[in-house]
Amino acid sequence: MTRATGKVDAMTVDSEGPLTEALGTDFFSVRRRFTEAQWDTFMAVRRYVDRVVSPAAPAAWDAAEMPWEVIRGLPDLGVVGDDIAGYGCPGHDPLTCGLVAMELARGDGSLATFHAVQSGLAMKSIAMLGSEEQKQEFLPAMARLDLVGAFGLTEPEHGSDSVSLESTARRDGDDWVLDGRKRWIGNGSIAGRTVVWARDTETNTVLGFLVDTSSPGYEAEVIPRKGSMRSVWQADLRLDGVRVPERDRLPGAESFKDTGRVLATTRGTCAWMALGHATAGYDAALRYALERQQFGKPLAAMQIVQERLVQMLAELTGMQLYCMQIAQLAEDDDLAPTIAGLAKMNNTRKARWVLSHARDLLGGNGILLDNHVVRHMADIESIHTFEGTETIQTLIVGREITGHSAFT
Ligand SMILES: Cc1cc2nc3c(=O)[nH]c(=O)nc-3n(C[C@H](O)[C@H](O)[C@H](O)COP(=O)(O)OP(=O)(O)OC[C@H]3O[C@@H](n4cnc5c(N)ncnc54)[C@H](O)[C@@H]3O)c2cc1C
Protein backbone atom coordinates (compact mmCIF):
# COMPACT_ATOMS: atom_id res chain seq x y z
CA MET A 1 0.00 0.00 0.00
CA THR A 2 1.33 3.39 -0.83
CA ARG A 3 0.58 6.34 1.36
CA ALA A 4 -0.12 8.52 -1.65
CA THR A 5 -2.88 6.41 -3.16
CA GLY A 6 -3.85 4.22 -0.23
CA LYS A 7 -4.48 1.41 -2.74
CA VAL A 8 -3.42 -2.17 -2.23
CA ASP A 9 -1.27 -3.57 -4.99
CA ALA A 10 -2.05 -7.28 -4.87
CA MET A 11 1.18 -8.04 -6.72
CA THR A 12 3.16 -6.61 -3.84
CA VAL A 13 1.27 -8.47 -1.13
CA ASP A 14 3.78 -10.56 0.73
CA SER A 15 1.85 -13.79 0.67
CA GLU A 16 4.23 -15.23 3.26
CA GLY A 17 3.34 -12.51 5.76
CA PRO A 18 1.10 -13.35 8.70
CA LEU A 19 -2.59 -13.47 7.81
CA THR A 20 -3.22 -10.72 10.35
CA GLU A 21 -0.82 -8.13 8.95
CA ALA A 22 -2.67 -5.10 7.56
CA LEU A 23 -2.74 -4.78 3.79
CA GLY A 24 -3.83 -1.16 3.99
CA THR A 25 -6.95 -1.85 1.98
CA ASP A 26 -8.32 1.53 0.86
CA PHE A 27 -9.62 1.15 -2.68
CA PHE A 28 -11.31 4.56 -2.82
CA SER A 29 -8.32 6.36 -1.29
CA VAL A 30 -10.33 7.78 1.59
CA ARG A 31 -7.10 7.99 3.56
CA ARG A 32 -5.88 10.83 1.40
CA ARG A 33 -8.00 13.00 3.65
CA PHE A 34 -5.97 12.13 6.77
CA THR A 35 -3.88 14.84 8.35
CA GLU A 36 -0.30 14.14 9.41
CA ALA A 37 -1.43 13.78 13.03
CA GLN A 38 -4.18 11.34 12.05
CA TRP A 39 -1.68 9.27 10.03
CA ASP A 40 0.75 9.21 12.93
CA THR A 41 -1.78 7.87 15.44
CA PHE A 42 -3.25 5.47 12.89
CA MET A 43 0.14 4.01 11.99
CA ALA A 44 1.29 3.80 15.62
CA VAL A 45 -1.82 1.82 16.55
CA ARG A 46 -1.54 -0.29 13.42
CA ARG A 47 2.06 -1.23 14.24
CA TYR A 48 1.06 -2.11 17.81
CA VAL A 49 -1.79 -4.24 16.51
CA ASP A 50 0.34 -6.10 13.94
CA ARG A 51 3.29 -6.66 16.28
CA VAL A 52 1.68 -7.11 19.69
CA VAL A 53 -2.11 -7.39 19.66
CA SER A 54 -2.78 -9.92 16.89
CA PRO A 55 -0.08 -12.42 17.88
CA ALA A 56 -1.40 -12.55 21.45
CA ALA A 57 -5.09 -12.70 20.58
CA PRO A 58 -5.75 -16.38 19.72
CA ALA A 59 -4.33 -17.79 22.96
CA ALA A 60 -6.08 -15.17 25.11
CA TRP A 61 -9.37 -15.87 23.33
CA ASP A 62 -8.92 -19.63 23.69
CA ALA A 63 -8.18 -19.32 27.41
CA ALA A 64 -10.83 -16.63 27.96
CA GLU A 65 -8.13 -14.58 29.70
CA MET A 66 -7.70 -10.83 29.41
CA PRO A 67 -4.29 -10.08 27.77
CA TRP A 68 -3.04 -7.68 30.45
CA GLU A 69 0.41 -7.21 28.89
CA VAL A 70 -1.30 -5.99 25.70
CA ILE A 71 -3.91 -3.90 27.51
CA ARG A 72 -1.22 -2.11 29.54
CA GLY A 73 0.33 -0.86 26.30
CA LEU A 74 -2.71 1.30 25.49
CA PRO A 75 -1.81 4.35 27.63
CA ASP A 76 1.62 4.56 25.96
CA LEU A 77 -0.14 4.71 22.59
CA GLY A 78 -2.03 7.74 23.91
CA VAL A 79 -5.46 6.39 23.05
CA VAL A 80 -7.25 5.96 26.38
CA GLY A 81 -9.82 8.72 26.76
CA ASP A 82 -10.43 9.18 23.03
CA ASP A 83 -11.73 12.71 22.35
CA ILE A 84 -11.82 13.91 25.96
CA ALA A 85 -9.70 17.05 26.19
CA GLY A 86 -7.58 17.72 29.28
CA TYR A 87 -7.44 15.54 32.41
CA GLY A 88 -4.55 13.53 30.91
CA CYS A 89 -6.71 12.39 27.98
CA PRO A 90 -5.66 12.53 24.30
CA GLY A 91 -8.36 14.88 23.01
CA HIS A 92 -8.37 13.18 19.61
CA ASP A 93 -10.65 14.33 16.79
CA PRO A 94 -13.54 11.98 15.81
CA LEU A 95 -11.72 10.49 12.81
CA THR A 96 -8.68 9.58 14.90
CA CYS A 97 -10.95 8.01 17.55
CA GLY A 98 -12.62 5.95 14.84
CA LEU A 99 -9.31 4.83 13.35
CA VAL A 100 -8.13 3.69 16.79
CA ALA A 101 -11.32 1.68 17.34
CA MET A 102 -11.04 0.17 13.86
CA GLU A 103 -7.42 -0.86 14.25
CA LEU A 104 -7.87 -2.34 17.73
CA ALA A 105 -10.82 -4.40 16.45
CA ARG A 106 -8.81 -5.46 13.41
CA GLY A 107 -6.44 -7.10 15.87
CA ASP A 108 -8.67 -8.16 18.72
CA GLY A 109 -12.36 -7.41 19.28
CA SER A 110 -12.05 -8.09 22.99
CA LEU A 111 -9.31 -5.47 23.35
CA ALA A 112 -11.36 -2.99 21.31
CA THR A 113 -14.35 -3.68 23.54
CA PHE A 114 -12.28 -3.15 26.70
CA HIS A 115 -11.13 0.17 25.24
CA ALA A 116 -14.68 1.12 24.19
CA VAL A 117 -16.00 0.52 27.71
CA GLN A 118 -13.11 2.36 29.37
CA SER A 119 -12.65 5.31 26.99
CA GLY A 120 -16.20 5.42 25.73
CA LEU A 121 -18.96 4.41 28.12
CA ALA A 122 -17.22 4.89 31.48
CA MET A 123 -14.97 7.90 30.86
CA LYS A 124 -17.52 9.67 28.64
CA SER A 125 -20.16 9.36 31.37
CA ILE A 126 -17.81 11.26 33.66
CA ALA A 127 -16.62 13.74 31.01
CA MET A 128 -20.17 14.54 29.87
CA LEU A 129 -22.14 14.28 33.10
CA GLY A 130 -19.61 14.51 35.95
CA SER A 131 -18.69 17.43 38.22
CA GLU A 132 -15.35 19.19 37.86
CA GLU A 133 -14.13 17.40 41.02
CA GLN A 134 -15.15 14.00 39.61
CA LYS A 135 -13.36 14.70 36.32
CA GLN A 136 -10.18 15.67 38.13
CA GLU A 137 -10.35 12.75 40.51
CA PHE A 138 -11.09 9.95 38.03
CA LEU A 139 -10.22 10.82 34.42
CA PRO A 140 -6.40 11.11 34.69
CA ALA A 141 -6.19 7.78 36.56
CA MET A 142 -8.50 6.16 34.00
CA ALA A 143 -6.40 7.51 31.08
CA ARG A 144 -3.35 5.81 32.65
CA LEU A 145 -5.43 2.65 33.28
CA ASP A 146 -4.58 2.96 36.96
CA LEU A 147 -8.34 2.91 37.40
CA VAL A 148 -10.57 0.68 35.29
CA GLY A 149 -14.17 1.76 34.70
CA ALA A 150 -17.40 -0.04 33.85
CA PHE A 151 -20.87 1.02 32.71
CA GLY A 152 -23.82 -0.74 34.31
CA LEU A 153 -27.04 -0.18 32.41
CA THR A 154 -28.41 -3.53 31.14
CA GLU A 155 -30.42 -5.66 33.58
CA PRO A 156 -31.46 -9.32 33.44
CA GLU A 157 -35.01 -8.30 32.47
CA HIS A 158 -34.19 -5.11 30.54
CA GLY A 159 -31.82 -5.17 27.56
CA SER A 160 -33.26 -3.44 24.50
CA ASP A 161 -35.78 -1.71 26.78
CA SER A 162 -33.17 -0.56 29.28
CA VAL A 163 -35.30 2.58 29.58
CA SER A 164 -37.50 0.45 31.90
CA LEU A 165 -34.62 -0.42 34.24
CA GLU A 166 -35.66 -1.45 37.76
CA SER A 167 -32.53 -0.89 39.89
CA THR A 168 -33.31 1.65 42.58
CA ALA A 169 -31.53 4.51 44.35
CA ARG A 170 -32.96 5.64 47.70
CA ARG A 171 -31.74 8.85 49.31
CA ASP A 172 -30.61 8.35 52.92
CA GLY A 173 -29.05 11.48 54.45
CA ASP A 174 -25.82 12.31 52.60
CA ASP A 175 -25.83 8.90 50.89
CA TRP A 176 -27.81 6.97 48.33
CA VAL A 177 -28.64 3.30 48.80
CA LEU A 178 -28.55 1.24 45.58
CA ASP A 179 -30.35 -2.06 45.02
CA GLY A 180 -30.79 -4.13 41.89
CA ARG A 181 -29.25 -6.49 39.36
CA LYS A 182 -27.21 -5.72 36.26
CA ARG A 183 -26.19 -8.07 33.46
CA TRP A 184 -23.49 -8.12 30.79
CA ILE A 185 -21.43 -5.40 32.45
CA GLY A 186 -18.04 -5.17 30.68
CA ASN A 187 -15.17 -4.80 33.20
CA GLY A 188 -17.77 -5.05 36.01
CA SER A 189 -15.62 -7.55 37.93
CA ILE A 190 -12.30 -5.72 37.52
CA ALA A 191 -13.35 -2.07 37.64
CA GLY A 192 -12.52 0.27 40.50
CA ARG A 193 -15.58 2.37 39.67
CA THR A 194 -18.75 1.31 37.88
CA VAL A 195 -21.17 3.85 36.47
CA VAL A 196 -24.49 2.46 37.72
CA TRP A 197 -27.82 3.68 36.36
CA ALA A 198 -30.66 3.42 38.88
CA ARG A 199 -34.12 4.84 39.41
CA ASP A 200 -34.69 7.42 42.15
CA THR A 201 -37.35 5.85 44.40
CA GLU A 202 -38.88 9.28 45.06
CA THR A 203 -38.99 10.86 41.61
CA ASN A 204 -38.81 7.73 39.39
CA THR A 205 -36.12 9.41 37.25
CA VAL A 206 -32.96 7.56 36.22
CA LEU A 207 -29.77 8.79 37.90
CA GLY A 208 -26.11 7.84 37.42
CA PHE A 209 -23.64 6.91 40.20
CA LEU A 210 -19.89 6.31 40.26
CA VAL A 211 -20.02 3.25 42.47
CA ASP A 212 -16.83 2.29 44.32
CA THR A 213 -16.71 -1.43 43.63
CA SER A 214 -15.08 -2.16 47.00
CA SER A 215 -18.29 -0.98 48.72
CA PRO A 216 -20.13 -3.60 50.78
CA GLY A 217 -23.06 -5.02 48.80
CA TYR A 218 -21.38 -4.77 45.35
CA GLU A 219 -20.87 -8.25 43.93
CA ALA A 220 -19.72 -9.14 40.42
CA GLU A 221 -19.62 -12.57 38.85
CA VAL A 222 -17.97 -13.07 35.47
CA ILE A 223 -20.32 -14.58 32.87
CA PRO A 224 -18.63 -17.85 31.87
CA ARG A 225 -18.42 -19.96 28.69
CA LYS A 226 -19.00 -17.24 26.09
CA GLY A 227 -18.53 -18.01 22.40
CA SER A 228 -17.74 -14.38 21.49
CA MET A 229 -15.40 -11.68 22.85
CA ARG A 230 -13.91 -14.32 25.11
CA SER A 231 -10.92 -12.28 26.28
CA VAL A 232 -12.89 -9.39 27.73
CA TRP A 233 -15.02 -10.15 30.75
CA GLN A 234 -18.64 -9.16 31.31
CA ALA A 235 -20.24 -9.65 34.71
CA ASP A 236 -23.55 -10.14 36.43
CA LEU A 237 -23.77 -7.50 39.16
CA ARG A 238 -25.70 -7.69 42.44
CA LEU A 239 -26.25 -4.42 44.24
CA ASP A 240 -27.55 -5.11 47.73
CA GLY A 241 -27.89 -1.92 49.74
CA VAL A 242 -24.72 -0.38 48.26
CA ARG A 243 -24.12 3.02 49.92
CA VAL A 244 -22.91 5.75 47.57
CA PRO A 245 -22.11 9.23 48.86
CA GLU A 246 -23.92 12.13 47.17
CA ARG A 247 -20.53 13.40 45.93
CA ASP A 248 -20.30 10.25 43.72
CA ARG A 249 -23.59 10.91 41.94
CA LEU A 250 -23.19 12.26 38.40
CA PRO A 251 -24.77 15.73 38.66
CA GLY A 252 -25.36 16.00 34.91
CA ALA A 253 -27.42 12.78 34.80
CA GLU A 254 -30.93 14.04 35.39
CA SER A 255 -32.96 11.52 33.39
CA PHE A 256 -32.61 8.56 31.02
CA LYS A 257 -32.16 11.08 28.19
CA ASP A 258 -28.70 11.80 29.62
CA THR A 259 -27.85 8.07 29.61
CA GLY A 260 -28.91 8.08 25.96
CA ARG A 261 -26.62 11.02 25.23
CA VAL A 262 -23.60 8.98 26.38
CA LEU A 263 -24.74 5.95 24.38
CA ALA A 264 -25.23 8.08 21.26
CA THR A 265 -21.57 9.11 21.31
CA THR A 266 -20.35 5.51 21.44
CA ARG A 267 -22.66 4.05 18.76
CA GLY A 268 -20.44 5.31 15.96
CA THR A 269 -17.52 3.52 17.63
CA CYS A 270 -19.35 0.24 16.99
CA ALA A 271 -19.53 1.05 13.27
CA TRP A 272 -15.74 1.59 13.24
CA MET A 273 -15.13 -1.60 15.21
CA ALA A 274 -17.24 -3.58 12.73
CA LEU A 275 -15.11 -2.11 9.93
CA GLY A 276 -11.98 -3.31 11.74
CA HIS A 277 -13.30 -6.86 12.01
CA ALA A 278 -14.33 -6.90 8.33
CA THR A 279 -10.93 -5.54 7.29
CA ALA A 280 -9.21 -8.34 9.19
CA GLY A 281 -11.38 -10.87 7.35
CA TYR A 282 -10.87 -9.37 3.89
CA ASP A 283 -7.10 -8.92 4.30
CA ALA A 284 -6.69 -12.49 5.55
CA ALA A 285 -8.82 -13.90 2.72
CA LEU A 286 -6.90 -12.01 0.01
CA ARG A 287 -3.55 -13.00 1.45
CA TYR A 288 -4.63 -16.62 1.76
CA ALA A 289 -6.13 -16.74 -1.74
CA LEU A 290 -2.84 -15.51 -3.20
CA GLU A 291 -0.86 -18.15 -1.33
CA ARG A 292 -3.06 -21.25 -1.41
CA GLN A 293 -2.79 -23.39 -4.53
CA GLN A 294 -5.51 -25.76 -5.71
CA PHE A 295 -5.86 -27.36 -9.13
CA GLY A 296 -2.36 -26.13 -9.93
CA LYS A 297 -2.95 -22.42 -9.42
CA PRO A 298 -3.59 -19.93 -6.64
CA LEU A 299 -7.17 -19.63 -5.38
CA ALA A 300 -6.89 -15.94 -6.31
CA ALA A 301 -6.65 -16.92 -9.98
CA MET A 302 -10.10 -18.58 -9.94
CA GLN A 303 -12.94 -16.47 -11.32
CA ILE A 304 -15.42 -17.23 -8.56
CA VAL A 305 -12.84 -16.49 -5.88
CA GLN A 306 -12.07 -13.16 -7.51
CA GLU A 307 -15.77 -12.34 -7.70
CA ARG A 308 -16.17 -13.07 -4.00
CA LEU A 309 -13.11 -11.02 -3.07
CA VAL A 310 -14.40 -8.10 -5.12
CA GLN A 311 -17.84 -8.32 -3.48
CA MET A 312 -16.13 -8.30 -0.09
CA LEU A 313 -14.06 -5.29 -1.14
CA ALA A 314 -17.20 -3.49 -2.33
CA GLU A 315 -18.88 -3.98 1.06
CA LEU A 316 -15.71 -2.99 2.91
CA THR A 317 -15.39 0.17 0.84
CA GLY A 318 -19.00 1.08 1.60
CA MET A 319 -18.32 0.60 5.32
CA GLN A 320 -15.27 2.87 5.05
CA LEU A 321 -17.36 5.59 3.41
CA TYR A 322 -20.00 5.32 6.14
CA CYS A 323 -17.28 5.70 8.76
CA MET A 324 -15.58 8.64 7.08
CA GLN A 325 -18.88 10.48 6.88
CA ILE A 326 -19.93 9.88 10.50
CA ALA A 327 -16.48 11.14 11.52
CA GLN A 328 -17.01 14.27 9.43
CA LEU A 329 -20.46 14.85 10.90
CA ALA A 330 -19.10 14.37 14.43
CA GLU A 331 -16.32 16.85 13.61
CA ASP A 332 -19.04 19.32 12.54
CA ASP A 333 -20.89 18.54 15.80
CA ASP A 334 -23.80 17.35 13.68
CA LEU A 335 -23.87 13.55 14.12
CA ALA A 336 -27.51 12.58 14.77
CA PRO A 337 -27.99 9.40 16.84
CA THR A 338 -30.03 7.90 14.00
CA ILE A 339 -27.17 8.43 11.54
CA ALA A 340 -24.71 6.75 13.91
CA GLY A 341 -27.34 4.04 14.43
CA LEU A 342 -27.72 3.42 10.69
CA ALA A 343 -23.91 3.19 10.38
CA LYS A 344 -23.77 0.67 13.22
CA MET A 345 -26.60 -1.36 11.73
CA ASN A 346 -25.12 -1.35 8.23
CA ASN A 347 -21.54 -2.06 9.24
CA THR A 348 -22.23 -4.91 11.65
CA ARG A 349 -24.49 -6.54 9.07
CA LYS A 350 -21.90 -6.18 6.30
CA ALA A 351 -19.05 -7.28 8.55
CA ARG A 352 -20.89 -10.50 9.36
CA TRP A 353 -21.28 -11.15 5.65
CA VAL A 354 -17.65 -10.34 4.79
CA LEU A 355 -16.38 -12.53 7.63
CA SER A 356 -18.51 -15.51 6.67
CA HIS A 357 -17.01 -15.39 3.15
CA ALA A 358 -13.50 -14.89 4.52
CA ARG A 359 -13.95 -17.91 6.77
CA ASP A 360 -15.10 -20.02 3.84
CA LEU A 361 -12.25 -18.90 1.57
CA LEU A 362 -9.75 -20.21 4.12
CA GLY A 363 -11.36 -23.66 3.86
CA GLY A 364 -10.68 -25.91 6.83
CA ASN A 365 -7.94 -23.55 7.97
CA GLY A 366 -10.67 -20.95 8.40
CA ILE A 367 -11.96 -22.58 11.58
CA LEU A 368 -8.57 -22.53 13.33
CA LEU A 369 -8.11 -19.82 15.94
CA ASP A 370 -4.48 -19.45 14.87
CA ASN A 371 -5.75 -18.15 11.53
CA HIS A 372 -7.86 -15.49 13.33
CA VAL A 373 -10.84 -15.22 10.98
CA VAL A 374 -13.16 -17.46 13.00
CA ARG A 375 -12.41 -15.37 16.11
CA HIS A 376 -13.46 -12.20 14.27
CA MET A 377 -16.53 -14.02 13.00
CA ALA A 378 -17.52 -14.92 16.57
CA ASP A 379 -16.66 -11.48 17.96
CA ILE A 380 -18.74 -9.53 15.45
CA GLU A 381 -21.81 -11.25 16.95
CA SER A 382 -21.37 -9.21 20.15
CA ILE A 383 -21.13 -5.89 18.31
CA HIS A 384 -24.22 -6.86 16.36
CA THR A 385 -26.03 -7.05 19.73
CA PHE A 386 -24.52 -4.55 22.14
CA GLU A 387 -25.26 -0.83 22.29
CA GLY A 388 -28.61 -1.39 20.55
CA THR A 389 -29.16 -4.53 18.47
CA GLU A 390 -29.32 -4.43 14.69
CA THR A 391 -33.13 -4.70 14.94
CA ILE A 392 -33.42 -1.89 17.47
CA GLN A 393 -31.23 0.42 15.36
CA THR A 394 -33.42 -0.47 12.38
CA LEU A 395 -36.58 0.39 14.30
CA ILE A 396 -35.12 3.69 15.52
CA VAL A 397 -34.22 4.71 11.96
CA GLY A 398 -37.61 3.37 10.79
CA ARG A 399 -39.33 5.65 13.29
CA GLU A 400 -37.40 8.61 11.95
CA ILE A 401 -38.23 8.02 8.29
CA THR A 402 -41.88 7.01 8.80
CA GLY A 403 -42.90 8.92 11.90
CA HIS A 404 -44.28 5.66 13.39
CA SER A 405 -42.66 3.97 16.37
CA ALA A 406 -42.87 0.22 15.83
CA PHE A 407 -41.24 -0.77 19.12
CA THR A 408 -42.82 1.18 21.96
C1 LIG B 1 -20.36 -8.85 24.83
C2 LIG B 1 -21.37 -7.90 25.41
C3 LIG B 1 -20.95 -6.79 26.13
C4 LIG B 1 -21.88 -5.94 26.72
N1 LIG B 1 -21.45 -4.89 27.51
C5 LIG B 1 -22.35 -4.15 28.19
C6 LIG B 1 -21.91 -3.16 29.13
O1 LIG B 1 -20.70 -2.93 29.30
N2 LIG B 1 -22.85 -2.46 29.82
C7 LIG B 1 -24.19 -2.68 29.66
O2 LIG B 1 -24.97 -2.02 30.33
N3 LIG B 1 -24.63 -3.62 28.78
C8 LIG B 1 -23.76 -4.36 28.06
N4 LIG B 1 -24.19 -5.34 27.17
C9 LIG B 1 -25.63 -5.58 27.02
C10 LIG B 1 -26.18 -5.21 25.65
O3 LIG B 1 -26.29 -3.83 25.53
C11 LIG B 1 -27.53 -5.96 25.48
O4 LIG B 1 -27.22 -7.33 25.31
C12 LIG B 1 -28.34 -5.43 24.32
O5 LIG B 1 -28.84 -4.15 24.58
C13 LIG B 1 -29.52 -6.36 23.99
O6 LIG B 1 -30.25 -6.68 25.12
P1 LIG B 1 -30.59 -8.21 25.44
O7 LIG B 1 -29.33 -9.01 25.35
O8 LIG B 1 -31.31 -8.25 26.74
O9 LIG B 1 -31.53 -8.69 24.28
P2 LIG B 1 -33.10 -8.46 24.12
O10 LIG B 1 -33.43 -7.02 24.34
O11 LIG B 1 -33.84 -9.45 24.97
O12 LIG B 1 -33.34 -8.79 22.60
C14 LIG B 1 -33.45 -10.14 22.10
C15 LIG B 1 -33.85 -10.06 20.63
O13 LIG B 1 -35.14 -9.42 20.51
C16 LIG B 1 -35.05 -8.31 19.62
N5 LIG B 1 -35.97 -7.28 20.05
C17 LIG B 1 -36.02 -6.63 21.24
N6 LIG B 1 -37.01 -5.71 21.24
C18 LIG B 1 -37.60 -5.77 20.02
C19 LIG B 1 -38.68 -5.08 19.39
N7 LIG B 1 -39.34 -4.10 20.00
N8 LIG B 1 -39.03 -5.44 18.13
C20 LIG B 1 -38.35 -6.41 17.46
N9 LIG B 1 -37.33 -7.10 18.00
C21 LIG B 1 -36.95 -6.78 19.27
C22 LIG B 1 -33.59 -7.88 19.68
O14 LIG B 1 -33.20 -7.15 18.53
C23 LIG B 1 -32.89 -9.22 19.77
O15 LIG B 1 -32.77 -9.78 18.50
C24 LIG B 1 -23.28 -6.19 26.56
C25 LIG B 1 -23.68 -7.29 25.80
C26 LIG B 1 -22.77 -8.15 25.24
C27 LIG B 1 -23.25 -9.36 24.48
Image (cartoon, helix red, strand yellow):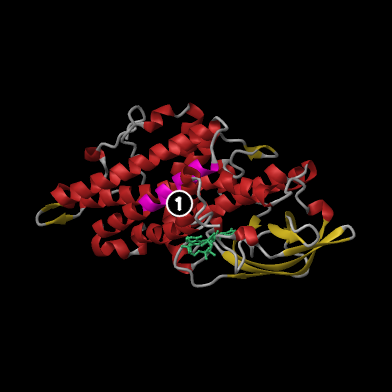
Q: Is residue 161 above or below residue 97?
A: below
Q: Quadrant of the N terminus?
A: top left
Q: Residues within 10 Å of mark 1 (few under 14, many from 20)?
A: some
Magenta stretch holds residue 68? no
Q: Nearer the viewer, residue 267 or 406?
A: 406
The quadrant where residue 370 appears: bottom left
Residue 93 percent across, percent down from the top left = 55, 34
Report if residue 193 is visible in the image.
no
Q: Main secondary structure of the magenta part?
A: helix
Q: Residue drawn 30% across and 58% down?
A: 359
Question: Is 255 on the left-hand or right-hand side of 173?
Answer: left
Magenta stretch holds residue 342? yes
Residue named by callout 1: 394
Residue 151 percent across, percent down from the top left = 64, 56
Q: Quadrant of the C terminus?
A: bottom right
Q: Is residue 38 above or below residue 354?
A: above
Q: Residue drawn 85% across and 59% down?
A: 175
What segment carries the magenta color?
Answer: 337-351
Dot 1: what SS?
helix
Residue 387 percent across, percent down from the top left = 54, 54
Question: Is 268 on the left-hand or right-hand side of 365?
Answer: right
Q: Nearer the viewer, residue 79 or 398?
A: 398
Q: Residue drawn 48% across and 59% down?
A: 385
* Amino acid type, residue under disc 1 in the picture: Thr
Residue 171 percent across, percent down from the top left = 84, 60
